Image (spheres, rainbow, N blue to C red):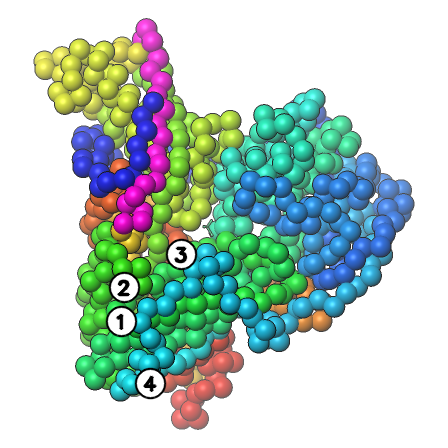
């Protein structure tokens, strides 16, 4: 078994040696045709033995208080109803969670609206839904804290408790007091929902005391542990299967309520149970992204060099939950400034608790940073790109460590060139087309790069077929494809000869998809397993790895060219690769970078913003597949545009519910909102990151783009909005009369 720990820079990557020529190519998704033909099972589609019953969650209709009692008699008498379960102590009170420990359980108290209290199971979905609504719950309502604005005053410092511990360098107050140019500005972002296309769903099947749950989850091995701990099962008594996922965005990171409720219901009625969280329930039954308040402090000397750079933020969380939105995660290393402050405070809101949503940290944190940078550049009379280039640090000044690879300046320069940045007017309200004011803005993108423990198994079966197995998942990002490419490249196999099997907790554990570290972690494990297979093939060819060439399904050494299928005809090759993070993660500041350039048109009559043009350039290590990488990038950019212009989960402060809990009212961009997106990746190899020399790209695109939109709106209209999303009413309020 090949095990590798990232304690030193990698020398030659296994991918450097491959000659199959499929790494980096814009290959189609290997499962793409089957997906668009409706031929792969999403969570609720799996066919199972036995007659499937349907569960629907019973959800609280108050936001805070105690449950005094349930009356299920009416529900139980309704047509098709098999059970109305409110008496199981394992009913989760927590919506979902990442850690291995059990979900918080118990339906005697409510601390967020829409929390699960039980499950009704019936022959059909309609019967179950009607009966779930007919379960009477008697509450003793308490005083919940529902109002974001009201709670922030009492926020407590998180210190070391936050995911980014509070850090100060130098004396930011003194620097602010003495600098010729300062900016002290506060930006706000609202709660966000994941809004994945596929709802959370589970099918639970018991065979004796063994449970299989088919579900839609990003991280199967962690969820399996949490499932057995929540239900009180032996560790080998549960299996999670999640081969295809219609978007996760962090919301499917940890075990969800649906898995536990379906398992409880299936055991109770002795039949398999399917439970799909409805779109309206999802907003309350999955954790949200915290609202944030970000105080940005910047000070510059007379030449525009930053002397202070600070981001002090306030986030919310429901009581007793460990996750705090890591607002400054990407900000720490972005720019120069000898005096620095990054602190986070938290306050309690009794609304659905907070967790990972699409680039936790950067997606919101870079908004504050990059809007403030634009405003400071204006104050200095400098071009925003030039101001950022002037403040490019030689190292991470917060943690005092070198960068691994960083091409932020190159991204900005290439982006400016491709976009035609020289056409930008230095001042607002200069360019109009009818009622539309035209403006241009830019912002930097950064997303931390991570690596985590992962394992993969690889077999070369008689006939030469390669099978890769790991519990990594494909959340719609292309994992099947890039893992096929990695194995194919190293083993000299066309991609059709590689079958990748994912998303089953029985496979070797690879963490899964999350934190933009899935490709690096699982991909490295696959590469290491493939390397061992190469060594075995060399031995069977009677040659050394150095003298062996693998291409098009053949092993070539000296003057011999043998089909790999022949080399395994007698004996399958089976190998396992294990990657572990190491010292490189601490010694170097690792991140993927980018720059976004945006052109907007803003109506002088209504304040409506239209995105006209987006150019984004990224540098994110080796790119495994130009097509899936671009898709990841544009997905992030589109989310970021929504975050800038429309996205907001609106709490009703009277009840603690989200008032806009469906996709008609929770506005995310649709095709008509998005122009062609010009995306480029710069060549880069990073030998400090992982054996593939790649970086995570899943959450890079969303970082910064919203600030580029805001900066472009200012450039068009002269209106700066400090409270996201930048809805038309906020722009309109600031427009001068002559803009109409
Ligand atoms: Mo992601 S929000 O780390 O799945």
Foreground pick, 17 / 348: 348
Region of the chain picked out in magenta, as a range: 569-587
**Residue at 45% across / 39% down in the picture?**
512
Reading the image, the residue beneath label 3 is 636
Reading the image, the residue beneath label 1 is 338
Q: Is residue 263 left or right of residue 554?
A: right
Check if residue 161 falls in the magenta segment. Answer: no
User: In the rendered structure, which disc, 4 or 3, sits on the residue that comes first in sequence?
Assistant: 4
User: In the rendered structure, which disc, 2 or 3, sits on the residue that comes first in sequence?
Assistant: 2
Q: Which mark is residue 397?
A: 2
User: In the rendered structure, which disc, 1 or 4, sits on the residue that comes first in sequence?
Assistant: 4
**Residue at 24% across / 84% down in the picture?**
381
The mark lying in front, picked from 2 and 3, is: 2
**Residue at 39% across / 37% down in the picture?**
453
Marks 1/3: CA–CA distance: 32 Å
Label 4: element kind: helix
Marks 4/3: CA–CA distance: 38 Å
Foreground pick, 610 / 639: 639
Q: Is residue 506 left or right of residue 566?
A: right
Q: Which mark is residue 177?
A: 4
Residue 513 percent across, percent down from the top left: 44, 43
User: From the viewer's perspective, is residue 553 above or below residue 705?
Assistant: above
């Amino acid at each position: 078994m090949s095990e590798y720990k990232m304690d030193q820079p990698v020398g030659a990557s296994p991918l450097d040696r491959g000659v199959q020529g499929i790494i980096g190519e814009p290959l189609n998704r290997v499962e793409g045709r089957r997906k668009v033909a409706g031929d792969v099972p999403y969570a609720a589609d799996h066919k199972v033995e036995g007659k499937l019953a349907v569960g629907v969650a019973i959800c609280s209709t108050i936001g805070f208080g105690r449950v005094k009692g349930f009356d299920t008699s009416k529900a139980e008498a309704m047509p098709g109803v098999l059970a109305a379960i409110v008496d199981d102590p394992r009913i989760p009170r927590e919506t979902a969670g990442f850690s291995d420990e059990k979900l918080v359980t118990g339906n005697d108290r409510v601390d967020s609206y829409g929390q699960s209290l039980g499950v009704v199971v019936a022959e059909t979905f309609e019967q179950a839904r009607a009966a779930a609504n007919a379960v009477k719950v008697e509450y003793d309502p308490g005083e919940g804290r529902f109002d974001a604005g009201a709670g922030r005053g009492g926020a407590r410092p998180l210190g070391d408790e936050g995911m980014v511990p509070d850090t100060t360098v130098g004396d930011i107050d003194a620097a602010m007091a003495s600098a010729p140019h300062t900016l002290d500005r506060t930006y706000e972002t609202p709660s966000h929902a994941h809004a994945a296309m596929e709802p959370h769903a589970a099918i639970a099947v018991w065979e004796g005391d063994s449970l299989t749950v088919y579900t839609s989850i990003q991280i199967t091995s962690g969820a399996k542990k949490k499932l057995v701990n929540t239900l009180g099962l032996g560790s080998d008594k549960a299996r999670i299967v999640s081969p295809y996922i219609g978007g996760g965005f962090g919301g499917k990171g940890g075990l969800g309520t649906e898995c536990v409720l379906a398992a409880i219901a299936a055991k109770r009625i002795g039949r398999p149970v399917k439970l799909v969280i409805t779109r309206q329930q999802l907003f309350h039954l999955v954790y949200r992204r915290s609202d944030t308040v970000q105080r940005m402090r910047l000070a510059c000397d007379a030449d525009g060099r930053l002397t202070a750079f600070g981001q002090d933020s306030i986030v919310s969380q429901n009581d007793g939950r460990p996750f705090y939105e890591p607002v400054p995660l990407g900000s720490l290393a972005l720019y120069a400034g000898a005096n620095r402050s990054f602190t986070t405070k938290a306050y309690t809101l009794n609304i659905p608790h907070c967790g990972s949503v699409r680039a936790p940290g950067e997606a919101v944190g870079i908004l504050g940073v990059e809007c403030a940078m634009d405003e400071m550049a204006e104050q200095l009379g400098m071009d925003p790109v030039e101001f950022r280039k002037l403040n490019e640090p030689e190292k991470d000044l917060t943690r005092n460590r070198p960068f691994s690879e960083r091409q932020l300046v190159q991204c900005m320069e290439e982006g400016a060139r491709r976009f035609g940045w020289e056409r930008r007017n230095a001042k607002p309200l200069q360019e109009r087309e009818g009622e539309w004011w035209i403006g241009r803005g830019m912002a930097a993108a950064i997303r931390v790069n991570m690596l985590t423990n992962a394992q993969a198994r690889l077999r070369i079966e008689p006939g030469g077929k390669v099978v890769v197995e790991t519990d990594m998942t494909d959340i719609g990002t292309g994992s099947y494809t890039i893992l096929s490419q990695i194995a194919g490249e190293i083993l000299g196999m066309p991609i059709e000869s590689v079958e990748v099997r994912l998303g089953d907790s029985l496979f070797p554990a690879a963490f899964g998809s999350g934190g933009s570290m899935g490709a690096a972690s699982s991909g490295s494990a696959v590469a290491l397993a493939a390397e061992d297979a190469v060594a075995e093939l060399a031995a069977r060819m009677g040659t050394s790895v150095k003298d062996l060439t693998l291409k098009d399904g053949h092993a070539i050494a000296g003057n011999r060219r043998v089909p790999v299928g022949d080399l395994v005809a007698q004996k399958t090759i089976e190998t396992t690769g294990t990657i572990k993070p190491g010292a490189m993660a601490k010694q170097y500041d690792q991140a993927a970078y980018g720059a976004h350039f945006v052109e907007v048109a803003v109506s002088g009559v209504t304040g409506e913003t239209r995105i006209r043009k987006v150019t984004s350039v990224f540098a994110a290590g080796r790119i495994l597949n130009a097509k899936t990488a671009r898709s990841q990038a544009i997905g992030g950019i589109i989310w970021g545009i929504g975050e800038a212009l429309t996205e907001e989960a609106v709490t009703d402060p009277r009840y603690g519910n989200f008032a806009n809990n469906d996709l008609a009212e929770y506005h995310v961009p649709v095709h008509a909102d998005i122009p062609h997106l010009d995306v480029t990746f710069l060549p880069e190899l990073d030998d400090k990151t992982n054996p593939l020399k790649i970086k995570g790209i899943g959450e890079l695109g969303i970082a910064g783009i919203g600030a580029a939109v805001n900066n472009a709106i200012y450039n068009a209209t002269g209106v700066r909005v400090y409270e996201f999303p930048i809805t038309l009413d906020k722009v309109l309020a600031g427009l001068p009369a002559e803009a109409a």
